[in-house]
Amino acid sequence: MEFTPEDVELVQFKNKQVSAQCNKIITKFAQKVSDMYDIPFDKLLKIAYDGADVEATDERCIALKIDKTRCTRHVQLDGYCEMHYKKLRIVEKKKPVVMEQVSHTHPMTVFFLNGCPACEKYS
């Protein structure tokens, strides 16, 4: 059986429609799970699309906008649009360094005490 160009075009159109509908469902589900369990939305979408066919994945950025809707920009880098990718990298660079908490072992009326871990650390 031979397919005409119109048949091929129709199948491609239907595939795009099905893919778009699946992506809407995946996005809604990821948003609900993200809200319910406090899991980052973009991480859920990365898991959902991991190993999926290129045609099955959404070509939109996986980040959420301020109004909690999905970004509509085209994917550029690692699932994000250029703007969200840059913001993500800035946030990753700014992660605070957790310092070890050391407490004084004496009342604060004593200025310095030998053997106190905090006094020795900061002297």
Image (cartoon, grey):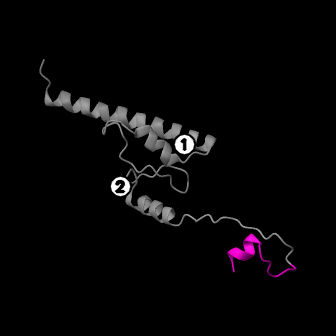
- In primary-sequence order, the first of circles 1 and 2 is 1
- Residue at figure coordinates x 68%, y 74% from the top left: 121
Q: Position of residue 22 (x, y in %)?
A: 41, 34
Image side of residue 22 versus residue 120, left or right: left
Instruction: Judge by depth and name the residue closer to the eye, 34 or 65.
Output: 34
- Residue at figure coordinates x 87%, y 80% from the top left: 109
- Residue at figure coordinates x 54%, y 42% from the top left: 31
Pointer 1: what residue?
31
- Mark 1 packing: few (<14 Cα in 10 Å), some, or many (20+)? many
Instruction: Judge by depth and name the residue closer to the eye, 101 or 86.
Output: 101
The vertical placement of 101 against 10, above or below, is below
Report the magenta stretch's main SS.
loop
- Residue at figure coordinates x 77%, y 72% from the top left: 116
Segment colored magenta = 109-123
Q: Position of residue 10 (x, y in %)?
A: 24, 30
Q: Distance of mark 1 from mark 2, alpha carbons?
A: 21 Å
The vertical placement of 109 against 59, above or below, is below
Q: Amino acid at mark 1?
A: Gln
At mark 2, the secondary structure is loop
Pointer 2: what residue?
77
Image side of residue 112 versus residue 8, left or right: right
Q: Amino acid at mark 2?
A: Leu
Image side of residue 103 versus residue 18, left or right: right
Image side of residue 99 versus residue 90, left or right: right
Q: Position of residue 120 (x, y in %)?
A: 71, 75
